């Protein structure tokens, strides 16, 4: 299941200097003309290879957006305010970026006749009653962030229905990998940092809550498939189908780092989702997507930064798959 080749296209990656966007840029450059639109508020310029056209600007700014999108064939839309808690504190502010500006972007895509792949989220499901969640599971977001992603996800479908814009929404579960950093990064990067410093690993609540952790290389491959699929106007779950408790995660990270950190429990996060896990059969069927990197090998590769991630035998269908930053075959 090699990644489809995307070559000789003009592509725009919004949020291209961020965690997911910058890995996608690595997969697209230099075989395509790659543009990045980023504010560099949380993105990092050093992630961008030479030869990429950088437009420093905000997706809320129609002029910057117009400039970035002029003449493009494909837009990968990863610019967002990703903090769920910030969206709870300031819903209008995150709505401006995550929804209103995204709508501007869809309009721009319509004008340019460009395909759009948008970053949606498992947050659209809120607290699911049954697991794993499929795309037909009722959506009931539990945060403004989730509402914004759901509205965007629905708009992408509508833009295909109403205006024939080729759109795909990818509902990411818990993505992890190199370059994930900062105050709003995920639990894996937080635990790794704590373990490396031999500081306490802080489990919020009882640690029995679970997540579906998907490696960045799998997320990039899902994007490449979404960029070429005929099955447009659809939303797809992007996860591994495997659930891991936060308690297991803490132990795995402590073992992998050889850290002497104690594992401690603190207050549970208000409104925390108890369990999350993806049914990815639609993505397998329609995109030919299957996650390849198991959690243990993904973590081992993070611990030894620069080491390729290798699918564990028990962890996935594609055994012995090697991943190094920038390689997606
Ligand atoms: C994640 C996504 C979010 C998405 C949501 C969809 C990240 C960073 N966030 O949120 O964008 O909308 O999935 O469902 O990927 N935890 C600890 N200790 C810590 C940090 C976290 O125990 O130091 C726990 C949290 O309480 C939570 C779990 O780890 O139970 C995962 O937290 P986090 O990585 O922040 O992601 P989600 O809240 O699942």
Image: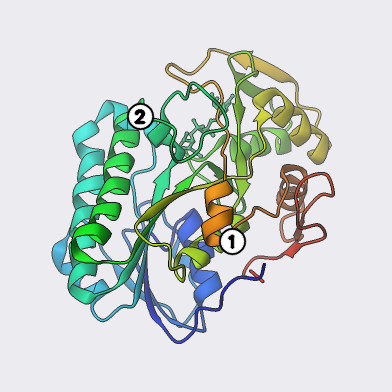
Is 50 positioned to the left or the right of 144 in the image? right
Q: Residues within 10 Å of mark 1 (few under 14, many from 20)?
A: some
How far across and down, in percent of the image, does residue 239 sit? Answer: 58, 45
Q: Is residue 107 above or below residue 71?
A: above
Q: Quadrant of the N terminus?
A: bottom right
Q: Which label lies toward us, 2 or 1?
A: 1
The colour scheme used here is rainbow
- Camera sees residue 91: yes
x 43%, y 42%: residue = 121
Residue 14 is at least partly visible in this image: no
Describe residue 308's horizontal placement relative to residue 201 as left or right: right
Question: How crowded is the residue under tag 2: few (<14 C-alpha within 10 Å), some, or many (20+)?
Answer: some
Which quadrant is home to the C terminus? Answer: bottom right
User: For mark 1, what is the residue?
Assistant: 288
Relative image position of residue 322 (x, y in whole percent) = 76, 64
Mark 2 or 1 closer to N-term?
Answer: 2
Q: Between 67 and 135, which is closer to the camera in this rendering?
A: 135
Residue at 30% across / 78% down in the picture?
72
Kindly indicate the quadrant of the structure image that contains residue 296.
top right
- Please identify the residue farthest to the bottom as the structure is shown: 8
Looking at the rendered structure, the secondary structure element under dot 2 is loop
Place of residue 34 in the rendered image (x, y in percent of width and height, measured from the top left) = 41, 77
Q: Decide: marks 2, 1 in contact (CB < 8 A)?
A: no
Q: Is residue 153 above or below residue 210?
A: below
Which residue is labeled 2 in the image? 141
Residue 262's place in the image compared with 121, above or below, is above
Q: Which mark is residue 45?
A: none
**Who's the residue at 74% across and 36% down the image?**
253
Q: Which secondary structure lies at badge 1? A: loop
């Amino acid at each position: 299941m090699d990644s489809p080749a995307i070559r000789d296209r003009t592509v725009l990656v919004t949020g291209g200097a961020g965690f997911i966007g910058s890995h996608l840029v690595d997969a697209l450059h230099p075989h395509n003309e790659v543009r990045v639109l980023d504010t560099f508020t949380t993105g990092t310029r050093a992630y961008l290879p030479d030869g990429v056209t950088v437009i420093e600007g905000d997706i809320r700014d129609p002029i910057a957006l117009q400039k970035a999108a002029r003449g493009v064939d494909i837009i990968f839309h990863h610019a967002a305010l990703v903090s769920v808690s910030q969206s709870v504190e300031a819903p209008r502010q995150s709505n401006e970026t995550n929804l209103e500006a995204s709508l501007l972007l869809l309009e721009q895509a319509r004008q340019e006749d460009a395909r759009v792949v948008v970053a949606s989220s498992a947050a659209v499901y809120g607290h699911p009653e049954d697991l794993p969640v499929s795309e037909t599971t009722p959506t009931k977001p539990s945060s403004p962030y989730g509402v914004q992603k759901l509205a965007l996800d629905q708009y992408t479908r509508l833009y295909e229905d109403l205006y024939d814009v080729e759109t795909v929404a990818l509902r990411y579960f818990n993505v992890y990998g190199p370059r994930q950093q900062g105050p709003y990064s995920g639990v894996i990067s937080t635990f790794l940092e704590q373990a490396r410093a031999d500081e306490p690993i802080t489990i919020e609540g009882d640690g029995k809550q679970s997540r579906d952790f998907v490696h960045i290389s799998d997320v990039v491959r899902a994007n490449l498939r979404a960029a070429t699929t005929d099955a447009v106007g659809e939303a797809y779950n992007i996860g591994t189908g495997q659930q891991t408790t936060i308690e297991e995660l803490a132990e795995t990270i402590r073992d992998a780092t050889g850290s002497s950190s104690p594992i401690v429990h603190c207050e549970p996060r208000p409104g925390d989702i108890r369990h999350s896990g993806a049914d990815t059969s639609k993505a397998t069927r329609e995109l030919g997507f299957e996650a390849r990197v198991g959690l243990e090998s993904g973590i081992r590769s993070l611990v030894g930064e620069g080491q390729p991630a290798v699918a564990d035998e028990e962890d996935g269908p594609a055994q012995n798959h090697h991943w190094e930053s920038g390689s997606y075959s």
